[in-house]
Image (spheres, helix red, strand yellow):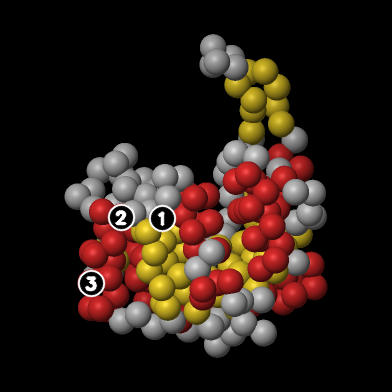
Amino acid sequence: MSISVIIPAGGVGKRFGANVPKQFVEIGGSPILVHTVEIFNQIEEIDSIVVCVHSEWYTFTKQMFDKYGKGKVKEIVVGGLERQDSVYNGINTKTVSESDIVLVHDAVRPFCTKDLVKRILETVEETGAVIPAIKPKETIKEVSHKNEVIKTIDRSKLSLIQTPQAFWYDILKNAYDKAMKANYYGPDSASLVEFIGYKVTVIDGEDINIKITTPFDLKVGELIFNDIKN
């Protein structure tokens, strides 16, 4: 069984406030994207990785992997206008099209553990589509455009979704093909699988598996990195 990973890393991170997109900001002396790729380099079951990047950062990314090592990165491809377009470009690469199972993982989630990935792989073999999630800890309220509370949401029914998300290749390809044809754009890969009527299984994610999207997240990430290393 062949397993590949698509890492969409096409964001330019204008709101992050750094001189480079957030996936290239360093933690512990290496870019976040390098840490993210290394997760899958260390997992025996993973055969290949495809990284999708913005055209302006294509050469920079190639040079980065020349410096830090490509590992299982088989292809670096130009992404699209939206994250969904970038993942779709990854799905249509030779590397991914020859896979049985495909994982899609955020470029800026560098602390996903091997245990989580292996639990995801075990589940996707049986279900065809699986995503990790954690329960919200705060009270959640629906708020109007006037900043007035409409209602309090029962958080026991809600989940905060993480990546990697995993799918049988044919399910993922079918979902993206139909979504793109219908001009439907969802917030993640699972939403496209849901769009075509396929059931998605949810398993427990990890608190440590944060997505670094703000300068505050970066500070938290540095604390996590230092804790892991120590």
Cβ–Cβ below 8 Å for labels 2 and 1? yes
Q: Label 3's element? A: helix
Q: Quadrant of residue 145?
A: top right
The residue furthest left is 19
Residue 129 percent location from the top left of the image: 72, 63
Q: Which residue is mark 3?
A: 63
Residue type marked 1: Gly
Q: Foreground mark, 1 or 3? A: 1
Q: Residue at position x 55%, y 72% from top?
A: 96
Q: On the rendered image, what quadrant is the N terminus found in? A: bottom right
Q: How busy is the neighbourhood of tag 1: few (under 14 within 10 Å), some, or many (20 plus)?
A: many
Residue 223 to residue 148: above or below: below
The residue furthest top is 146
Residue 130 visible somewhere in the drawing: no
Q: Which residue is mark 2?
A: 55
The first of marks 2 and 3 along the sequence is: 2
Residue type marked 2: Ser
Q: Residue at position x 29%, y 75% from top?
A: 65
Tell me if 54 is positioned left or right of 19 in this view.
Answer: right
Residue type marked 3: Gln
Residue 230 percent location from the top left of the image: 37, 77
Mark-to-mark CA distance, 2 and 1? 7 Å
Residue 111 percent location from the top left of the image: 46, 67
Q: How busy is the neighbourhood of tag 2: few (under 14 within 10 Å), some, or many (20 plus)?
A: some
Residue 140 percent location from the top left of the image: 64, 33
Q: Label 2's element? A: helix
Mark-to-mark CA distance, 1 and 3? 17 Å
In the rendering, which numbered label is found on residue 79?
1
